[in-house]
Each structure stands twice: as structure tokens, then as C-alpha cells.
Image (cartoon, rainbow, N blue to C red):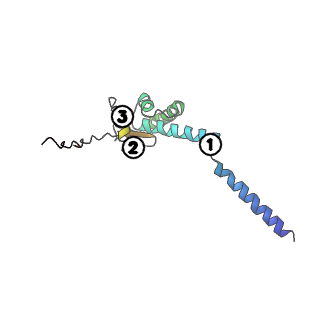
């Protein structure tokens, strides 16, 4: 007799508790993810032999304290285990590239490391759209 209301209450509470995860991540979870991303970026930069200043310049949105902590941890690890740096495969973005050119070619992004992206600019020839006027031949 009491089974049906008890099972209904248990099922309802399970559905309500499962919905808590659908609301989004908590601020603590987001902060922990940013910290982990920054540490990973810093470690990858150090492993690639990049200076910390270059790492900051390439990853402007990353938390600088987390990037430095990851860079320092990887530096200590590489010294302890006598690991050489690995040359980066992607060159840093051109300093003189105009923002308009980069925005025009947004879909063309190459990435070698998490959090590190370099915009590759392709120049396309201009299309000839001039049509002769009716009176001019």
C-alpha cells in the first residue's frame, strides 16, 4: 500500500536532483577549470622552449598567475628529468598583421597546443566585377 507513494516520491526526488547539473557549472568549478587551463598552457609553453613573456602574448585570455605556475612547474620537472625543449611547429602570429585581415579569415585557425591558436592569413585575388557600360565598347 505504501509502496506506490514511496516509489513516486523516490522517482520525483531523483528527477529533481538530476536537474541540478543542468543549471550550469558553479563559479568554483569554472575557476578551477581556468586555473587548470592556465597551468596547461604554461607547461606547454615551457616544454616548447618559449619565454614566459611570449606565452603571455600568445595567450592573452589566460590567467597569468596560472600560466606562470604551469610554466614554473614544467621548468622544474624538465630540469629534474633532464628533458630538452621541443621546437614549436607553429610560428607566432605576425606582429604587423592587421586585425581586419585576421577577422576576414576567421575560420582558418591552426592550433598546436591547447589554448594556443595562430591565425593564418590567406590572400585571395580580387575578382573582376567591372562590367562594360552599354555606351562604351
Residue 92 makes an appearance in the image: no
Give the residue displayed 43% in from the left and 36% down from the top: 45
Q: Which residue is mark 2?
A: 112
The crowding category of the residue bearing disc 2, from other C-alpha atoms within 10 Å (few below 14, some 14 to 19, many at least 20), is: few
Q: Is residue 54 left or right of residue 28?
A: left
Give the residue displayed 79% in from the left and 66% down from the top: 7
* Residue 5 placement: quadrant: bottom right
Q: Is residue 12 above or below residue 2?
A: above
Mark 1 touches mark 3? (CB < 8 Å) = no
Whichever of labels 2 and 1 marks the residue nearer the N terminus, that label is 1
Element on which disc 2 rests = strand
Element on which disc 3 rests = helix
**Residues under labels 2 and 3: Cα distance?**
24 Å
**Residues under labels 2 and 1: Cα distance?**
26 Å
Total number of numbered labels?
3
Q: Which residue is mark 1?
A: 29
In this view, the mark in front (1 or 3): 3
Q: Which residue is mark 3?
A: 100
Amino acid at each position: 500500500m505504501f509502496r506506490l507513494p514511496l516509489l513516486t516520491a523516490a522517482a520525483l526526488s531523483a528527477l529533481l536532483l538530476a536537474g541540478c547539473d543542468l543549471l550550469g557549472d558553479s563559479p568554483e568549478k569554472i575557476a578551477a577549470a581556468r586555473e587548470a587551463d592556465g597551468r596547461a598552457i604554461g607547461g606547454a609553453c615551457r616544454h616548447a622552449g618559449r619565454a614566459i613573456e611570449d606565452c603571455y602574448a600568445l595567450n592573452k585570455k589566460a590567467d597569468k598567475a596560472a600560466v606562470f605556475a604551469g610554466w614554473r612547474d614544467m621548468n622544474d620537472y624538465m630540469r629534474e628529468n633532464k628533458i630538452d625543449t621541443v621546437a614549436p611547429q607553429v610560428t607566432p602570429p605576425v606582429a604587423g598583421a592587421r586585425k581586419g585581415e585576421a577577422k576576414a579569415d576567421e575560420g582558418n585557425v591552426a592550433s598546436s597546443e591547447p589554448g594556443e591558436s595562430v591565425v593564418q592569413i590567406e590572400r585571395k585575388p580580387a575578382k573582376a566585377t567591372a562590367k562594360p557600360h552599354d555606351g562604351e565598347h
